[in-house]
Image: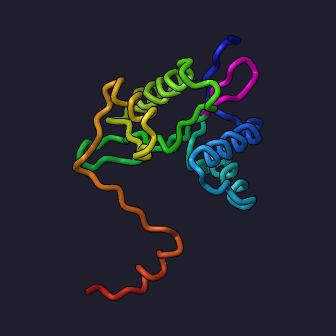
Amino acid sequence: MPPITIRKATRKDSKPLLDLIDALADYEKLKRPTTSARRRLIEDAFSRRRRYDAILAFVGDRPVGYAIILEIYSSFLALPTLYLEDIFIVPELRRRRIGFRLFQFCVNEAKKRGCGRLEWMVLDWNSPAIGFYKKIGARHLKEWLPFRLEQAQFGSVIRAKRS
Protein backbone atom coordinates (compact mmCIF):
# COMPACT_ATOMS: atom_id res chain seq x y z
CA MET A 1 0.00 0.00 0.00
CA PRO A 2 1.31 3.52 -0.80
CA PRO A 3 2.19 5.77 2.14
CA ILE A 4 -0.55 7.30 4.30
CA THR A 5 -0.49 11.08 4.76
CA ILE A 6 -2.68 13.04 7.15
CA ARG A 7 -2.75 16.84 6.87
CA LYS A 8 -4.94 19.92 7.17
CA ALA A 9 -6.92 20.65 4.02
CA THR A 10 -6.32 23.77 1.96
CA ARG A 11 -8.62 25.53 -0.50
CA LYS A 12 -6.99 23.46 -3.28
CA ASP A 13 -8.50 20.40 -1.54
CA SER A 14 -12.08 21.65 -1.94
CA LYS A 15 -13.19 19.05 -4.49
CA PRO A 16 -11.77 16.01 -2.65
CA LEU A 17 -13.22 17.30 0.63
CA LEU A 18 -16.68 17.71 -0.91
CA ASP A 19 -16.41 14.29 -2.57
CA LEU A 20 -15.64 12.69 0.80
CA ILE A 21 -18.52 14.55 2.46
CA ASP A 22 -20.78 13.13 -0.27
CA ALA A 23 -19.37 9.66 0.43
CA LEU A 24 -20.21 10.03 4.13
CA ALA A 25 -23.75 11.16 3.26
CA ASP A 26 -24.13 8.09 1.04
CA TYR A 27 -22.78 5.82 3.81
CA GLU A 28 -25.21 7.28 6.36
CA LYS A 29 -28.06 7.27 3.83
CA LEU A 30 -28.48 11.05 4.07
CA LYS A 31 -29.01 13.66 1.37
CA ARG A 32 -25.81 15.10 -0.04
CA PRO A 33 -25.17 18.81 0.61
CA THR A 34 -26.95 21.16 -1.79
CA THR A 35 -25.04 23.47 -4.13
CA SER A 36 -25.41 26.38 -1.70
CA ALA A 37 -24.36 24.20 1.25
CA ARG A 38 -21.28 23.09 -0.72
CA ARG A 39 -20.33 26.76 -1.25
CA ARG A 40 -20.76 27.44 2.48
CA LEU A 41 -18.67 24.38 3.39
CA ILE A 42 -15.76 25.72 1.35
CA GLU A 43 -16.19 29.32 2.51
CA ASP A 44 -16.43 28.28 6.17
CA ALA A 45 -13.33 26.10 5.90
CA PHE A 46 -11.02 28.38 3.97
CA SER A 47 -12.06 32.02 4.37
CA ARG A 48 -10.51 34.54 6.73
CA ARG A 49 -13.22 33.78 9.29
CA ARG A 50 -12.83 30.02 9.40
CA ARG A 51 -15.55 28.17 11.27
CA TYR A 52 -13.90 24.73 11.19
CA ASP A 53 -10.77 22.89 10.15
CA ALA A 54 -10.84 20.00 7.69
CA ILE A 55 -8.25 17.26 7.94
CA LEU A 56 -7.63 14.91 5.01
CA ALA A 57 -6.20 11.40 4.87
CA PHE A 58 -4.43 10.26 1.71
CA VAL A 59 -3.14 6.91 0.54
CA GLY A 60 -0.49 7.99 -1.93
CA ASP A 61 -2.17 10.84 -3.81
CA ARG A 62 -5.70 9.49 -3.31
CA PRO A 63 -7.90 11.27 -0.72
CA VAL A 64 -9.53 8.49 1.31
CA GLY A 65 -10.83 10.12 4.45
CA TYR A 66 -11.51 13.32 6.30
CA ALA A 67 -12.30 14.82 9.67
CA ILE A 68 -13.95 18.11 10.55
CA ILE A 69 -12.95 19.67 13.86
CA LEU A 70 -13.86 22.88 15.67
CA GLU A 71 -13.45 24.34 19.11
CA ILE A 72 -16.19 24.72 21.69
CA TYR A 73 -15.60 25.82 25.27
CA SER A 74 -16.03 24.25 28.68
CA SER A 75 -16.89 26.75 31.38
CA PHE A 76 -16.17 24.19 34.09
CA LEU A 77 -12.72 23.26 32.80
CA ALA A 78 -12.11 26.83 31.60
CA LEU A 79 -10.49 25.25 28.55
CA PRO A 80 -11.47 24.69 24.95
CA THR A 81 -12.88 21.34 23.86
CA LEU A 82 -12.04 20.07 20.41
CA TYR A 83 -15.25 18.81 18.83
CA LEU A 84 -14.98 16.18 16.13
CA GLU A 85 -17.96 16.75 13.83
CA ASP A 86 -17.11 14.12 11.20
CA ILE A 87 -14.54 11.38 10.77
CA PHE A 88 -14.82 9.17 7.72
CA ILE A 89 -12.70 6.71 5.76
CA VAL A 90 -13.92 5.26 2.47
CA PRO A 91 -15.35 1.80 3.26
CA GLU A 92 -12.99 -0.18 1.01
CA LEU A 93 -9.94 1.08 2.93
CA ARG A 94 -11.16 0.56 6.48
CA ARG A 95 -9.33 -1.75 8.89
CA ARG A 96 -5.97 -0.49 7.61
CA ARG A 97 -5.39 1.93 10.51
CA ILE A 98 -6.04 4.99 8.34
CA GLY A 99 -8.97 6.02 10.56
CA PHE A 100 -6.82 5.49 13.64
CA ARG A 101 -4.10 7.72 12.18
CA LEU A 102 -6.71 10.38 11.33
CA PHE A 103 -8.11 10.15 14.85
CA GLN A 104 -4.58 10.42 16.30
CA PHE A 105 -4.07 13.61 14.27
CA CYS A 106 -7.21 15.06 15.89
CA VAL A 107 -6.02 14.05 19.37
CA ASN A 108 -2.64 15.68 18.69
CA GLU A 109 -4.43 18.80 17.48
CA ALA A 110 -6.46 18.91 20.72
CA LYS A 111 -3.23 18.61 22.71
CA LYS A 112 -1.50 21.29 20.61
CA ARG A 113 -4.43 23.69 21.15
CA GLY A 114 -4.45 23.13 24.92
CA CYS A 115 -7.89 21.53 24.89
CA GLY A 116 -9.22 19.89 28.02
CA ARG A 117 -11.04 17.19 26.07
CA LEU A 118 -12.05 15.85 22.68
CA GLU A 119 -15.73 15.08 22.08
CA TRP A 120 -17.84 13.64 19.28
CA MET A 121 -21.07 11.78 18.63
CA VAL A 122 -21.62 8.45 16.92
CA LEU A 123 -24.78 7.02 15.40
CA ASP A 124 -26.19 4.20 17.52
CA TRP A 125 -26.14 1.76 14.57
CA ASN A 126 -22.48 2.35 13.73
CA SER A 127 -21.09 -0.62 15.64
CA PRO A 128 -17.66 -0.60 13.91
CA ALA A 129 -17.09 2.99 15.07
CA ILE A 130 -18.45 2.27 18.56
CA GLY A 131 -16.14 -0.74 18.82
CA PHE A 132 -13.16 1.39 17.78
CA TYR A 133 -13.96 4.11 20.33
CA LYS A 134 -14.35 1.57 23.13
CA LYS A 135 -11.09 -0.11 22.12
CA ILE A 136 -9.13 3.15 22.49
CA GLY A 137 -10.69 3.84 25.90
CA ALA A 138 -13.25 6.51 25.00
CA ARG A 139 -16.15 6.79 27.41
CA HIS A 140 -19.80 6.77 26.30
CA LEU A 141 -21.49 9.68 28.08
CA LYS A 142 -24.77 8.09 29.14
CA GLU A 143 -25.65 10.96 31.44
CA TRP A 144 -25.74 13.51 28.57
CA LEU A 145 -28.60 13.45 26.08
CA PRO A 146 -28.09 15.08 22.69
CA PHE A 147 -30.72 17.65 21.71
CA ARG A 148 -31.04 19.59 18.49
CA LEU A 149 -32.92 22.63 17.29
CA GLU A 150 -33.03 22.98 13.49
CA GLN A 151 -32.69 26.36 11.76
CA ALA A 152 -36.34 26.27 10.64
CA GLN A 153 -37.35 26.22 14.32
CA PHE A 154 -35.31 29.27 15.39
CA GLY A 155 -38.06 31.77 14.61
CA SER A 156 -40.74 30.00 16.61
CA VAL A 157 -38.46 29.84 19.65
CA ILE A 158 -37.49 33.51 19.33
CA ARG A 159 -41.15 34.56 19.01
CA ALA A 160 -42.43 32.23 21.74
CA LYS A 161 -43.64 33.69 24.99
CA ARG A 162 -42.13 32.13 28.08
CA SER A 163 -44.63 29.86 29.80
Indicate the position of residue 86 as horizontal and vertical percent values. 53, 42
The scheme the figure's colours follow is: rainbow
Q: Nearer the viewer, residue 95 or 98?
A: 95
Indicate the position of residue 32 as horizontal and vertical percent values. 67, 54
Q: Nearer the viewer, residue 19 or 7?
A: 19
Per the picture, the main secondary structure of the magenta-coloured stretch is strand
- Quarter of the image with the N terminus is top right
Q: Is residue 72 above or below residue 55?
A: below
Q: Is residue 17 found left or right of 81 in the rendered image?
A: right
Indicate the position of residue 116 as horizontal and vertical percent values. 32, 35
**Exactly how many numbered labels are in the figure?**
0
User: Over which residues does the magenta segment extend?
Assistant: 55-65
Q: Nearer the viewer, residue 68 or 99?
A: 99
* Residue positioned 25% across, 86% down in the render: 163
* Residue positioned 65% across, 44% down in the render: 21
Q: Is residue 154 above or below residue 92?
A: below
Answer with the quarter of the image where residue 82 lies.
Answer: top left
Answer with the quarter of the image where residue 95 lies.
Answer: top right
* Residue positioned 64% across, 19% down in the render: 5
The answer to whether residue 123 shows anywhere in this view is yes
On whether residue 120 falls in the magenta region, the answer is no
Q: Is residue 133 found left or right of 8 in the rendered image?
A: left
On whether residue 60 falls in the magenta region, the answer is yes
The answer to whether residue 56 shows anywhere in this view is no
Indicate the position of residue 55 as horizontal and vertical percent values. 60, 33
* Residue positioned 29% across, 85% down in the render: 162
Q: Is residue 95 found left or right of 122 in the rendered image?
A: right
